Image (cartoon, rainbow, N blue to C red):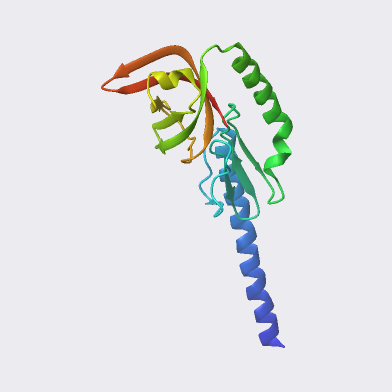
Amino acid sequence: MIVMKKCFKVIGIILGVIVILGIVFFVVDYNRVQKQEKPIFCIQNPAGMINDGGTIEYFGLGYKVIDFHTLVGFDDIKIGSWFMDYNDFEEEMKKYEEKFEEEMRKSKHSFLGKVIESSSTYIIVEPNGNEDIRKSSDKISIGLGENNDAFYEIGTNVKITYDGTIMESYNKVYAILDKQVI
């Protein structure tokens, strides 16, 4: 009987410590998310990035963080329960998609192609065979700029819009990037 009480007491203390740690971890990560910073007491979803431009899910002790980085410009961090889902924010993302599509309609310079090389600072795109830019080069290097969290997988189809400026140097062609879309 005494041994049983000690076991319950130990289990209660352990559960209490886990709950307190969960609350502390959540409060710290919540404050970081409010400042648009990545959480520190979470692990990244082992399934990897969501193929939308670089959105990452993190799991904490009883909570989840989704760090959005979509190709259409939705760049936000959300925190909630483990039941929070990427699709819960479709309406917010739809606003960015509509704005992006409107900008694309106004753009005069764009081409479709496939990513053939990718790094954190640039991608190399092979324009589709029927694109006019293909007359300049069959490989276009596109700088992604500083503070870019998006990662483009090799083989991804993209639409590149640019300001019309094409720079050629040593048989390389550079497009000045405005936006990209899958």
Q: Residue at x 63, y 69 (%)?
A: 13
Q: Residue at x 57, y 41 (%)?
A: 51
Q: Nearer the viewer, residue 30 or 111?
A: 111
Q: Quadrant of the N terminus?
A: bottom right
Drawn side of residue 17 relative to residue 151, left or right: right
Q: Nearer the viewer, residue 92 or 78?
A: 92
Q: Quadrant of the C terminus?
A: top right
- Above or below residue 40? Residue 94 is above
- Above or below residue 89? Residue 103 is above
Image quadrant in which you'd find residue 139: top left
Drawn side of residue 20 relative to residue 88, left or right: left
Q: Position of residue 50 (x, y in %)?
A: 58, 43
Q: Nearer the viewer, residue 160 or 58?
A: 160
Image quadrant in which you'd find residue 96: top right
Q: Exactly how many numbered labels are in the figure?
A: 0
Q: Position of residue 71 (x, y in %)?
A: 56, 30
Q: Nearer the viewer, residue 151 or 61?
A: 151
Q: Residue at x 67, y 30 (%)?
A: 93
Q: Residue at x 60, y 32 (%)?
A: 76
Residue at the far bottom in the pictured view:
1
Q: Position of residue 86 (x, y in %)?
A: 67, 42
Drawn side of residue 170 relative to residue 98, left or right: left
Drawn side of residue 99 relative to residue 176, left or right: right
